[in-house]
Image: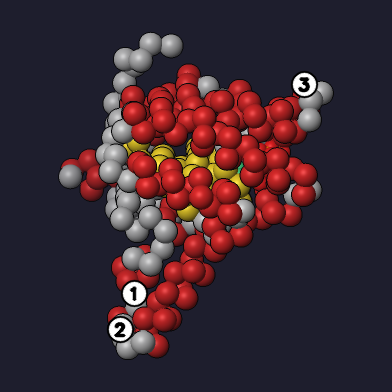
Amino acid sequence: MPDNVQVSILPHHVAIVMDGNGRWAKQKNKPRTFGHQAGSRLLHEIVEESKNQGIHVLTVFAFSSENWKRPQQESSFLMGLFIKVMQREINELHSNHIQVRFIGDRSVLSKTLQQVIADAEKLTAGNHKMVLQVALSYSGQWDIATAARCVAEKVSGGELAVADVDEQHFAAELSFADLPDVDFFIRTGGELRISNFILWQAAYAELYFSDVLWPDFSVVEYRKALEEFAHRQRRFGRTGEQVLAS
Ligand code: IPE
Ligand code: IPE
Ligand code: MG
């Protein structure tokens, strides 16, 4: 696939639910872990393509708060995989000027994984080509509840008046408050649901669902999705005529 195929109108912030690894492996009579490994290789390509297209922020759902309910063997395999993938990819990400960040409840992660995350974030903090956010032990409801706790602390500390608690003050306490909201929300794997991924900051995201299982999702499929985004009319409450006139 040539590198120079550019999509016309790009989302600033793409969020992807990388779903379907387990079913992909099952189709091949392999263990689910085989699917997760294949999925991590595809992520490398999607990051590269996002950077080449000029996307500012790519957020990927790697492990949800609810995924802790999976068999212990699968979640510990995944935690080990996250460590290996970061160790394998971090130097290339850094040399491509990509800033790596993690969102989610990192207090429940192993000390080793916490260290790998801290090192990756520190190394790449000054990079400005693109932000890659990995949502790990993340859920939209966790994010909102954590922000609510911060707002409550500010109110009880006298820093913020109850009457001043509005969308703006609240959003300032959420994860990635310094980054644009999600413009384009992609889910692979055929399920038509959000599964507690980004909620507040995806309030006006365009949604795109693909039946392709994540390890089979490709740069070609990704470009197809981006092309569709370019043809959506985003109205943000206004009429289509107002948008055309603006
Ligand atoms: C997504 O693939 C990866 C994670 C949730 C970690 P799944 O593991 O959910 O794959 P399916 O949905 O069972 O096929
Ligand atoms: C969402 O996929 C989480 C990730 C892709 C990391 P799931 O496979 O966990 O979602 P549900 O449980 O089918 O809704
Ligand atoms: Mg799934």
Indicate whether 234 appears above or below 2. Answer: below
Q: Position of residue 70 (x, y in %)?
A: 75, 49
Which element is circle 3 on? Answer: loop
Query: Quick one: SS at disc 1?
Result: loop
**Residue carrying label 3:** 28
Closer to the N terminus: mark 2 or mark 1?
2
Measured in 3D between alpha carbons, the distance from the residue under mark 2 to the one under mark 1, in whole angstroms, is 14 Å
Front position in the image: 93 or 71: 93
Cα separation between marks 3 and 1: 50 Å
Which image quadrant is residue 4 in?
top left
- Tell me the element at label 2: loop
* Residue at the (48%, 30%) spot, across then down: 89
Q: Position of residue 121 (x, y in %)?
A: 40, 47
Q: Quadrant of the C terminus?
A: top left
Query: Which quarter of the picture shows residue 34?
Result: top right
Residue 224 in sight in this render: no
Please give the residue where the numbered disc 1 appears in the rendered image: 166
Viewer-nearest of discs 2 and 1: 2
